Amino acid sequence: MRDQPIMRRIRWQHLGVLVPLFLLGVAERAIAHGVVMEYTATQAYEITAAYDTGTPMAEAQVAVFSPDNPSEPWMTGTTDAEGRFLFSPPSPGNWEVQVRQAGHGDVMVVAVEEGAIADTPSDEPADTAAADASAAAQETAAEPPAAQSGGGSTQAFTGLQKGLMAGSVIWGFVGTALFFSQKGSLKKR
Amino acid sequence: MHIPDGVLPPQVCVGGYAVTGLATWYSLRQINRRENPSADVPKAALMTAAFFLASSLHVPIPPASVHLVLNGLLGVVLGYFAFPAILIGLFFQAVMFQHGGLTTLGVNAAMMGGSALLAYFIYSCHPIAKRWLGEQWSRLTFAFIAGASGLGFAILIFLGLVITQIPTGFDAQMERTAIYGLALAHVPMMLLEGFFTAAIMLFFYRVKPELLPD
């Protein structure tokens, strides 16, 4: 309650100063106390990042680059404990998502199609979108377009496939060793 | 430990390939000067297989999974063969399991192979301590130091590269904390690799000492 008289005094006495400030938008935050919350249903893409051992990349940093500007990130944030990250691209194109933690990371291109974008106007600046990323994940109805999942940057092989691949490479090395040891023994003769 | 694609800027990747090219040329020249250059190829091929497999053996130490690298061991056992062996091993890891990457193959090979050569030089100093420790114990001690420092040097190079090359748009402080955490997680791995290197060296020394480089 003590604030009110002071505020009033400032308003009347320094009106000449405050009005230009108001117009510049500098004093807007200081004076406005009311909060307006809204929600819109939008479509979002969920990124899941995990190490190749299957452990999710929790708290990893994410940078999303728009198709128009590949050098400055359109949005940054961190993944949750399950390695998930949500973002809703406002325009179609190839969106580049970079995930990084302790020098480990990957780059993935998310191809956003024309029809996948919701019609809701999104003139929200990128910075606030970044700050609200986690909140947006809970508040908005996050529906990936027709629940399609984009191909990851690395194909997931089954244990058997991996074993077979490793086995064939190992056999290549062993074969090389056998070949050269035979050649050596021929030389001795 | 392996730096994946897209983490480093192109200049660093090209620089890595340049260093790797030079080191490979130097190693092959040293090998070619030997009396029978292909004599050690079977041993090198088998050690490459071990190196290739080692990175699949993960040890879960937070914040990231840590795995054996064995570059110190390759340096101690193979000498100059270690560099081409590591280069080939890394190539197959990148192609088969997307572990590391083809653009960063040069950087990774320079990082791990260079450290392996350093480990070899450390191990080849073992006659210094022979007078006090005796032949076997001086070899063991130097193999341990070489195995541990082979990984240690690689971590230091990794740290230097990754910390100086945090791209804009990422929270540098948070990333640095994560990197230091990862480096700390490698300290027990250094000890493990040291013991492992010493054990393998001892095995070769007892069973077939001519397999070890001078």
Image: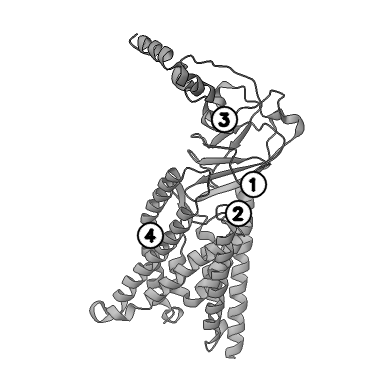
2 vs 3, front mark: 3
The amino acid on which the numbered mark 3 sits, given as a three-letter code, is Ala
Label of residue A129 in the image: 3
Q: Seen in the image, is B108 located left or right of residue B203?
A: right
| Marks 2 and 3, how far apart at CA | 32 Å
Quadrant of the image containing the N terminus of chain A: top left
The amino acid on which the numbered mark 1 sits, given as a three-letter code, is Ser
Name the chain under label 2.
Answer: B
3 vs 4, front mark: 3
Label 2: few (<14), some (14–19) or many (≥20) C-alpha neighbours in 10 Å: some
| Marks 4 and 2, how far apart at CA | 24 Å
- Please state which of residues A175 and B54 is positioned toward the viewer in this rendering: B54
The amino acid on which the numbered mark 4 sits, given as a three-letter code, is Met
Q: Seen in the image, is A111 located left or right of residue B200?
A: right
| Marks 1 and 3, how far apart at CA | 25 Å
Label of residue A153 in the image: 1
The amino acid on which the numbered mark 2 sits, given as a three-letter code, is Gln
Q: Are marks 1 and 3 in contact (CB under 8 Å)?
A: no
Residue at the bottom extreme?
A: A189
Name the chain under label 4.
Answer: B
Which type of secondary structure does the marked residue at label 3 adopt?
A: helix
- Please state which of residues A156 and B120 is positioned toward the viewer in this rendering: B120
